[in-house]
């Protein structure tokens, strides 16, 4: 687990997602939807400006449809956030 804050963990999760996307031949513009699973929705709302900044710095102006889902916990008990992305690559 990298980072103890929601923005730190979000930045790492997004970086990992974008690395996988690039390896598959995609770009941030190919992200059709991202689901953000968080253990604390209120903290996510409070961190929204910073999370938006991280997203813009990492993925640029491309902004897929996004949903935030509050959950009780993630597999790793120290995890605060997990991202799940749906990508559409041209064929």
Image (spheres, rainbow, N blue to C red):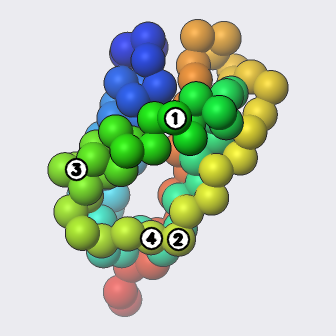
Few, some or many residues within 10 Å of mark 3 (<14, 14–19, 20+): some
- 59 vs 36: above or below: below
Contact check, label 2 and label 4, Cβ < 8 Å: yes
Sequence-wise first label, 1 or 3: 1
Q: Horizontally, is 54 left or right of 34 in the view?
A: left
Please name the residue that numbered disc 3 is placed on: 58
Which residue: 35% across, 86% down? 90
- Residue bearing the label numbered 1: 46
> In x, y percent, where is residue 85?
52, 57
Name which residue lies at 36% across and 50% down: 52
Query: Residue 22 location, x and y as percent?
Result: 25, 58
Disc 4 marks which residue?
64
Q: Distance between the residues labelled 2 and 4?
A: 4 Å
- Above or below residue 23? Residue 43 is above
Q: Furthest-bottom residue in view?
A: 91
Q: Are marks 2 and 1 in contact (CB under 8 Å)?
A: no
Residue 64 position, x and y percent, is 44, 70
Quarter in which the N terminus is drawn = top left
Horizontal side of 24 relative to 77 (left or right) equals: left
At numbered mark 4, what does the secondary structure look like: helix, strand or loop?
A: loop
Of residues 31 and 8, which is closer to you in this image?
8
> Within the image, what quadrant is residue 73 found in?
top right
Q: Residue at x 37, y 44 (%)?
A: 49
Circle 1 crowding by C-alpha within 10 Å: few under 14, some 14–19, many from 20:
few
Q: Residue 14 or 16: which is nearer the viewer?
A: 14
> Disc 3, disc 4: CB below 8 Å?
no
Q: In the rendered image, which quarter is residue 45 located in?
A: top right
Res. 65 mark: 2
């Amino acid at each position: 687990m990298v980072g103890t804050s929601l923005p730190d963990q979000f930045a790492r999760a997004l970086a990992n997602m974008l690395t996988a996307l690039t390896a598959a031949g995609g770009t941030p513009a190919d992200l059709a939807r991202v689901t953000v699973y968080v253990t604390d929705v209120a903290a996510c709302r409070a961190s929204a400006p910073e999370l938006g900044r991280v997203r813009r710095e990492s993925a640029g102006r491309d902004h897929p449809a996004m949903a935030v889902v509050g959950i009780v916990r993630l597999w790793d008990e120290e995890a605060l956030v997990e991202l799940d992305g749906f990508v559409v690559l041209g064929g």
